[in-house]
Amino acid sequence: MQLKFLQFRSSGAAPKVLEIVDRYDVECVPPSFRSNKLEYIKDSSIPKNCSRYLQVNKHMKAPIYIYYQLDNYYQNHRRYVKSRSDKQLLYGLKYNYTGSCSPEDANNGLPIVPCGLIAWSLFNDTYSFFHGADALKVNRKNIAWESDRNHKFGKHVYPFNFQNGSLIGGALLDPAIPLSDQEDLIVWMRTAALPSFHKLYGRIEEDLHADEILEVKILNNYNTYSFGGRKKLVLSTSSWLGGHNNFIGIAYISIGSSFIFIALVFMLLHVKNPR
Amino acid sequence: MAGGGIRAKIRRSSLYTFSCYRPRTSEEEGPHDIQGPGYSRMVYCNQPHLHEQKPLKYRTNYISTTKYNILTFLPKAIFEQFRRVANLYFLLAAILSLTDVSPFSSVSMIAPLAFVVGLSMAKEALEDWRRFIQDMKVNLRKASVHKGDGVFGNRPWMKIRVGDVVKVEKDQFFPADLLLLSSSYEDGICYVETMNLDGETNLKVKRALEVTLPLDDDATFKDFNATIRCEDPNPSLYTFVGNLEYDRIVYPLDPSQILLRDSKLRNTAYVYGVVIFTGHDSKVMQNSTKSPSKRSRIEKQMDKIIYILFSLLVFISFISSIGFIVKTKNDMPNWWYLRPPDKNNLFNPNKPLVSGFYHLITALMLYGYLIPISLYVSIEVVKVLQALFINRDIHMYDEETGTPAVARTSNLNEELGQVDTILSDKTGTLTCNQMDFLKCSIAGAAYGTHASDVELAAAKQMESGNAFGQSEIELETVVTSTDENERKPAIKGFSFEDSRLMNGNWCKEPNADVILLFFRILSICHTAIPELNEETGDLTYEAESPDEGSFLVAAKEFGFEFCKRTQSTVVVRERYSSFQEPIEREYKVLNLLDFTSKRKRMSVIVRDETGQILLLCKGADSIIFDRLSKNGKAYEEATTKHLNEYGEAGLRTLALAYKNLEEAKYSAWNEEFFKAKTSIGGDRDVMLERVSDMMERDLTLVGATAVEDKLQKGVPQCIDKLAQAGLKLWVLTGDKMETAINIGFSCSLLRPGMKQICITATNEATLSQDPEKSVKENILMQITNGSQMVKLEKDPHAAFALIIDGKTLTYALEDDMKHQFLNLAVDCASVICCRVSPKQKALVTRLVKEGTGKTTLAIGDGANDVGMIQEADIGVGISGCEGMQAVMASDFAIAQFQYLERLLVVHGHWCYKRIAQMICYFFYKNIAFGLTIFYFEAFAAFSGQSVYVDWYMLLFNVVLTSLPVISLGVFEQDVDSEVCLQFPALYQQGPKNLFFDWYRIFGWMGNGLYTSLIIFFLNIIIFYDQAFRAGGQTADMTAVGTAMFTCIIWAVNCQIALTMSHFTWIQHLFVWGSVTTWYVFLAFYGELSSALDENAFRILTEVLAPAPIYWITTLLVTIACNLPYLAHISFQRSFNPMDHHIIQEIKYYRKDIADRHMWKRERSKARQETKIGFTARVDAKIRLLKGRLQKKYSTMSASTVIQHQT
């Protein structure tokens, strides 16, 4: 289910928070494959590079947060949500019960670390940003909750037997990096509440100026074509309230006005027939 | 008693003139032929050891009324718990939660259920324990039992065995069903009070067999041996068939030798008896029916709501499952990240129907939060606490007897607030069954200044009630004695005050000779026996009826002390003035013409010391007036006037008359009388009556007495208040019609000017073939006439009273007539049924209950009320008296009738509102919470995933929202108790069911629906994809769920705070404490390692609390959720206020103190239109006076018309 009706995208209402949204799932498929995107994405021999150019309309102050947005993706499906083992994420192979991770619990008789569908389907598009020829520095550290890094994902747990099966899901993990440092995985493992969601990819730590053109080099690896999910890249600044969110203001104003309205009605009624 | 005591030397049986010569038919019969089934019991008297083995081992005398014992408690109590549909559902859900189907972890399903069921069971256990304690109190009572060798010793009741010889002393209860062997009277009679069995207060005579009479000493039982063969245990109280084999001769036994358990020995120093039936075999225990479990109307309606919610649950589960099937079948194959298909078939797109079926089960469990699991247990807890309040109410504590009110079942608290009709017993409930001699009229002069209760209360009412027309009313108001302090210490049965008669002053009155005669009639014409109290030297009288007792006390106070009765004489100590020594005069009693309800009079024929033969007669005024001689009517007119006044004052009146007899005439009559007395056959009574009638003619009127059937304290006021509260009161009494009507007058159920519709069966045997039918037709005609009369009445103030007797009632209660009867009865302001049997009481109760469909309350004190108490929606027992039978059967026990007002108007009103609001709120909060889970499903492909952490949901019902609602149920009061009592009309909110009608219930459900929508969608919109922190992080499922849950906690707790109108620190603590608990829990839970599994690790401290948007959202959602309710209550208060709103406002602005006039006006407005009670009586009187006044004015000047509003 799409949440289109909920999307408030008026650019003027919250001048502090600026947003650049770019949908690239269609454009990044070569025109010859447009009729059969599925074949394109499944064929690993075809290069998945793709370049997108984004125009910065207004000055955006650092930090600028990079998100990827997926639509029609049920991270909140019960089968999906349950398919993980938090104990294993923390203790690694020392914890050998992975029944909850089914069907992605073991491969070739060996347990998978990290197990489960969530880890298996890790998002694997990558973005790199260029300012003309200069690469923009993207900070991809500290995008996950601190407590997750310190307490939930083991510092000495390394990926093992991951994506070794016949079916490759999403991203591969570097077996040399402990899980606690695999922040993409940590962000991904925080399952989203709704089928349309943003996930933090990284931060650009310098200001973007008005009328600048950014080039984004995308590796369009992730398969959303089989279920028709859109992929978007979102660049956004934030305020004390977080991201782009006009709704709360509107809601407060409408509640306030309904109070005033009711008060007026009562007053009128009272004037007309006092008790 | 071996050592002295009162040994009545006279054969009292001979006082009963009509029966004393009656041959004892049973003695002539042979022993009963006892064989076959139903007559197998053998009792070896005085050999209880023989009864220790089978087959003679009978049940012990241990009684138990508990529901469970230690072994059966667990299985039985658990079974009881899971008979409730909701609990059964949760049990199934808990079992299923162990499988993969479950959306939740199993502990989150099992823990709340275990908690809830455990609590309910603990309550059951506690209640059963109380019953056990009560049983043990009875079981451990001591009785004197023969222990062998003629020695008696005390033994607890429970250790008494069949065959034991027991000795019961005066005023003790019989420990088991006994065969009477002998008594302190020589002729082996004893007097028994069976109040506990049938509610009758008069004493019954039991008579031992002649053969066992010598066994009247402890020592004689040394070698006593006998065998009883008799019927098996059965519930029939009035039959007994058995034989006694003693000294190898078999004697037949009949019910007059049987002393039943729970009846009481009276007027007899002691009796000896052999135990025949023990414990549960005894007749009274066989008779006790299990009191039916009653459920209140609200609870029944609540069940319906639960069913509605169940339907809703099933409905949304089906929707979910259909959605799931569609999604799984069509979309899921494309969701590669889920790796379909699933080998467990839970999510298998190839087998969507199988998966769909599993999902249905999941959904049924997932949406289980729609059903409030803790509702039953919360209600139980609340009711127990409410009952505690009732039990502890100091205003319902009777200091004299030390009995508090007791809510014996807590199930019916709220039903107390919905009562429409009260069915009341009379004796012992409305009245104390104690007569007070109050006034008399002698020789056409009225004596006695003391006002009756009715007069006092009416006077008080008039003083306080009405500002206008005061002067006119005062003219007619009875002057009441104001010198309360000067009153002498009260003498039981005597409240007469008039110096003209007291202290011998009567000698100076003009008609001293008539007065003398009057006193003599009082002291001679009766059947009582005097009893000397050895400690004080005073005489007390054991009279058949309390009226007689009060006459004797009065005579004694006037100086005519009846001091001795022998077989044929009555000795009266007469003292003409306080300075004189009393003179003992002996009157020879020649004949005694008994009182019967048909004759309505009694007479004695005595020969005084001068040899003059006198007939002294007392009886109902109408009867006596018919029998006066031409010369004897000198005072008739004046006396009639007085009698009317007395009647109006609610007093019981009797007229006294006498006649001088000539020797010759008397002896002629006596011969005939003797003949009649000794005749055998059916017409004996008729003959006796005819002969007596011949004698009781040509009397001379002496005067009349007015006795107050002492109403219990506060009864008239209580009835008045209850009437103002809109309650109807029916009196069902075993008494005769006149008495009932008198009481009706004295407690203002009847008043002069009220139209009485008396329905009686015609007695004369009609000549038609079918007398039954003609009687029925006659009654039907009376009923239709009555209805016609009511219908045709134009005067809006006209009030009707229906008076019907038991015999007529048997016909009126038949199926074809009962509805007409009921319709007529409902139209009448008061209904009095007299001479009704216990069974009829129950039948009338059922008729009212089922015929009108309204809540009935039955109140009574005796065992004869048990049926009625059990039949009514609420049974109330009067616990002040000794009888426990009614109390044991009742749902509530109060010490006095007057506490009924507080029980209903205060506690009932409160409890009704509390429970109603509580249940509504429960549904509200569970709908508000449960539906958010459903909405989320729509966004999670109906996969059965919940957005909340299991632990939140576990705590929702049990911890986070339970205490505020319990405090609402326990402490809420719309207005305080004083105001409740001042505005009895507030009570009508209950019977009208203003707080639990479908409008309100659906209103609350709608509110729940609204709240759920607001909570879910506001949160989703705010949190769904944008970063919620300045650090750019987006909210994951746990964060969204937690934020949403926070909003729910705030919204429902603020809602209950808005609902409450009475706040103490407890409510504040619970409501705001619940909100705090949520945060505290969240902080703690976030630190637990188990939170790691749920993504809830440090959810509050790290994720949500630093985000301002979390707090802003909470505020926004809470306000938005409560906005409509706030608007609704503001609108209602301002533009359409209910009674209690106005009162609250007046109280709040302290208008009741500042503006007394307004307060009073509101109070009089808040009265329910009533036709019974003082207020109505006063109103009627005012109307009458005004009518008179108007006539006067209009004759004076036609232009002056005075209009009064009432």
Image (cartoon, coloured by chain):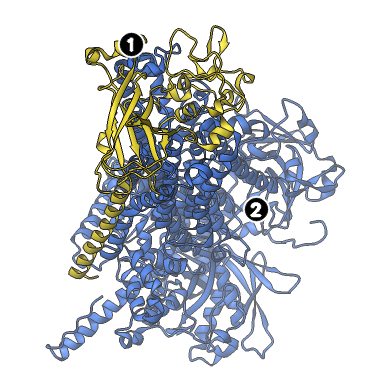
Image coordinates of residue A230 in percent, x first then y, are 29, 25
Give the label on residue B1172, or none.
none
Which amino acid type corresponds to the residue marked 2 in the rendered image?
A: Lys
Point 36% across, 26% down: residue: B942
Q: Nearer the viewer, residue B873 or B679?
A: B873
Q: In what element is the residue under mark 1?
A: loop
Most distant residue in the front direction: A133
Residue marked by disc 1: A46
**Residue B821 in sight here:** no
**Residue A157 in sight here:** yes
Left/right of residue B580 with respect to residue B116 in the rendered view: right
> Few, some or many C-alpha atoms within 10 Å of disc 2 (few <14, some 14-19, many ≥20)?
many
Same chain for mark 1 and mark 2? The answer is: no
Image coordinates of residue B962 in percent, x first then y, are 50, 46
> Few, some or many C-alpha atoms within 10 Å of disc 1 (few <14, some 14-19, many ≥20)?
few
Q: Chain of mark 2?
A: B
Above or below for B1000 versus A272: above
Point 38% across, 83% down: residue: B477
Residue marked by disc 2: B264
1 or 2: mark nearer the eye? 1
Q: In what element is the residue under mark 2?
A: strand
Q: Nearer the viewer, residue B107 or B620?
A: B107
Image coordinates of residue B368 in percent, x first then y, are 43, 33
Q: Nearer the viewer, residue B675 or B524?
A: B524
Specify the quadrant of the image occupied by residue B745.
bottom left
